[in-house]
Amino acid sequence: MNAYDILYGLEYIDKDLTEKAVNYKRNSLIYLRAVAAACLILVFGVSAVLSGITIRNSVSIRESDISKRFGVCSADNQADAIKKVVASEGYQPPVWNFIDRYLNGEYFSLIYGKAKNIETYKTETPHFTWYITIFDIEIIRAISNAPESGTVKVCAVTFSSDIRSSYYKASEDFDILNDPEAFFILNNADTPKNTFWNEADVRTIGETDIYTFDYADYYLTKQCEMIEDIVRLYDAELTLDELEEFKANGIPDEKRFYDISKKNSDRIREIERANTKYQPSYGPDDHVMKEFENGDFSIKVILQGADEDFDYSKIMARVYDAKESSRDSGGGVGYDSTYRFSVALDKDGTAVFDRPTDHFSIIIDEYTLPENAKQIGGSFFYGPDERSDTIILKDQN
């Protein structure tokens, strides 16, 4: 740390004085020593407040205005700039290997907290527009390599591009405007180069010359959804208590790990069922319900192993249109689908409705299925000549 950093790190000295101290001619030593003496007095005066706090590359000791330092401009619309971007990860080992790595890696920090003081900037490079979001996380609970309380500063990176590309330095599932309270997987300043899937260096933002830890103590790797105290972490659901247990005692064997995850998945399912009568799983118009007395298409749903008097009326079918989007030289056709509406089955498992387009698809909404029931085959696609179908649900017991 040089004299420039020290002087600008002291926030309670008039800015004019610090400017003069830094830029004053070298032969004006008396004036500079006087200012330095004042700085030392202030340092000793606030030392009790700063005791026990470690500042690593903090914004307070560097040029805090990112637009002045690198010429980037504030994003015109912060909500549009903060995009959900899923980074390319390549080969994925089993989920418990991921979690063990996060819990025990020195350069991964795990925090449950609330995002606030959100600022977004953007800068251009060839083919990419980079969005740099700097925000604070108010710590509710720290799991690994983070302070137990207080606030930490975090940098997240998203992008848009005029070429089809995934970029491994983007932050994953980044949605702090809609979901500020979440579980955050962070890289800290101890992250060595070329360790992030053997290629990424989160220290430098994308193709820019911007150094992450000039502005923040952590880089956002991934934001995970929380359901009460359960973290949805890749393909597993684990409570904060369980994560702390695994941190202390190691990841359990595969069978116990998945038993724990399934127990939490079942609990999430019950929470979601209790909180809403109908919670659709996809689409922008999530609450469009339609009723048809007649229609040009019908489905019959059968739950294997169900009693003869089983009531299907709580199950919903989601209906999507299908519009041609591409056609290859071999005659193959690609379709884009958009959710249009949902229909409820009757007690016997039948629903009749009008197809939204000549080609369309159906999926049974998982949130409305009985416990342990699963649709066989995912979504179902239909052409203009088809008029009915039978969909089988499998009991997973």
Image (tube, rainbow, N blue to C red):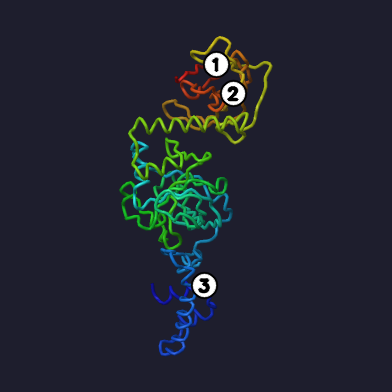
**Closest to the observer, 312 or 50:** 50
Where does the N terminus fall, quadrant-wise? bottom left
Identify the image quadrant of the C terminus. top left
Q: Which mark is residue 11?
A: 3
In the image, residue 28 lies at what x, y percent?
A: 44, 89
Residue at (62% x, 27% y) in the render = 341
Q: Which residue does the numbered mark 1 point to in the structure image?
A: 301
Q: Quadrant of residue 256?
A: top left
Asked if marks 3 and 1 touch (Cβ < 8 Å), the reply is: no
Q: Residue at x 57, y 53 (%)?
A: 78
Give the answer, above or below, for where 217 lies relative to 259: below
Q: Which residue in the protein does label 2 denote? A: 316
* Residue furthest right in the image: 293
**Element on which disc 3 rests:** loop
Between discs 3 and 1, the one toward the N terminus: 3
In this rendering, the count of numbered labels is 3
Query: Residue flagged by tag 1: what amino acid is it?
Result: Val
Q: Position of residue 152 (x, y in %)?
A: 48, 57
